[in-house]
Amino acid sequence: MTGFQTLLYKELLRFWKVSFQTIAAPILTAMLYLLVFGHVLEGRVEVYPGVSYTAFLIPGLAMMSLLQNAFANSSSSVIQSKVTGNIIFILLPPLSHGEFFWAYVIAAAIRGLVVGAGVFAVTLFTSAVPWPSPLWALTFALLGGGILGVMGLIAGIWADKFDQMAAFQNFIIMPLTFLSGVFYSVHSLPPFWQGVSHLNPFFYMIDGFRFSFFGVSDVSPWLSLSIVGACFAGLSLGCLQLIKAGYKLRR
Amino acid sequence: MSPAVEIRGLSKRYGKLQALDKVDLRIERGEFFALLGPNGAGKTTLISILAGLALADDGEAHVMGHCVRRSYREARRALGVVPQELVFDPFFTVRETLRIQSGYFGLSKNDDWIDEIMTRLDLASKADANMRALSGGMKRRVLVAQALVHKPPVIILDEPTAGVDVELRQGLWQFVTQLNKDGHTVVLTTHYLEEAEALCARVAMLKQGRVVALDTTRNLMRSVAALRLQVWVTPDRLPSSLESGAVKGADGSFTIPLARHADVADAVVALRSSGLEVSAMRILEPDLEEAFMRIMSRQ
């Protein structure tokens, strides 16, 4: 195995060893959302004609879980390694900044995909959701997982303590995910908040992903794909620069 | 042939603290070298720059002829570092830790060597124990093993025996001495100066980011520290011929500097002939600790 493959393997092994916490728990949380919101709002809200609220909710929940867990994976791994000091085991070997970056981001995206697929799998019993168009679904899932993996990496590198990491998560990631149209269509919002929602890149991840299930969406999937792709590229370039410069890693 | 470590004009500043100030240092291949200095002298900063954990503001550092910035891959392959802090990854067992560390260097079929270092460091019985379950001494051994998984020609040990029991300390030194005999260059920092004196042929002393002494251990001890005679006498005074340079200790003793061993007899004669009774005496050989104290106080 190369250094890159080893770091990727280590990152995968890390969350796999505590899979109750890293995979099973977020799937259960998504189920609880589905149970409560689905039960309360089923029949009262129809977002798209002919699509039940539960069906509308499931792709959004799957994607939200995917995003949150991708972020949690890279951010918690880096901050834990920094705080405990064992980050030096990764900084001492001859790994390039690109290898470092991709190992963390791919591992984060994989954890996101496993959780997202898990959420989707356990909702199959509701038989509410049609099978998605695999190409669109996978593209948005990968890009979404990648973006949040990169954001997690940036947050992990930037934060010096768990408190700062929690702030990043609670004040940036949580609002962006909850206000992305997971639980509603942004068309149901007043025009001002619709406009604000369109500034949220997470909205395009959810909207594009949902398109792969229903063939309908708030904006064109091609627009979503362009914005999500541009976000991934921009954040990746920024993050690669941080790692290359040794920002908060090599002092 | 390029030296094991070559440092030229290395400087590093952290805020107002000048951690390293234009340091030059050359360590030849195969040396057992000590890097000494009080806390905050810049030892760990110097090691961190060599290892790529810190970036120098100015100057150059090479390991086995490879620049730590431009040829970082080759430089890091040539270097094994045992860090000062007792760090570990709580997710893995000892064997997993060593396999993963080995993999970072691109070595996937390395189990024979991993088994050998585990045996030599007395870790074999803990191979499948989680890192969390190990005692401090055992964790320290794993850190040593991790630094050696890729058989680096240069090994840096940053205070490896801090808080370590006597048994492990001796076992560790035996192991490291053997590595040095096998051709590895060993660089050591320690606060236990008797360890450096016993093991290291050459010493650099750092103070406030500068090299203030650099010589063979023997030369340093001879040139800076002196042979001394410590005596307890009644009545409590020295004859005037021995008073020059003598120091009175809190335990009532007098420490008299001597130029050579033959002067011991003359000193005893001078004491006896002035009617003093010698109740105890001992000869203090020059040691590295004495040399260290003198060098640090005069700079």
Image: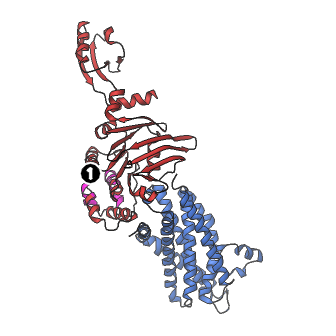
Chain colours: A blue, B red
Q: In which quarter of the image is residue B226?
A: top left
Give the magenta range: B117-143
Q: Which of A86 and B64 is in front in this view?
A: B64
Q: What element carries label 1?
A: loop
- Residue drawn at x 28%, y 60% is B126
Is residue A34 visible in the rendered image? The answer is no
Characterize the local packing of mark 1: few (<14), some (14-19) or many (20 or more) Cα atoms within 10 angstroms.
few
**Considering the image in quadrants, where does the N terminus of chain A appear?**
bottom left
The image shows residue B284, relative to residue B166, as above or below, that is above
Q: Residue furthest front?
A: B1
Q: Tag 1: residue type?
A: Asp
Residue farthest to the right, as pictured = A191
The answer to whether residue A160 is above or below residue A134 is: above
Q: Is residue B295 visible?
A: yes
| Image location of residue A170, percent across then percent down | 60, 65
Residue at the image point whose x is 33% and y is 30% from the top = B221
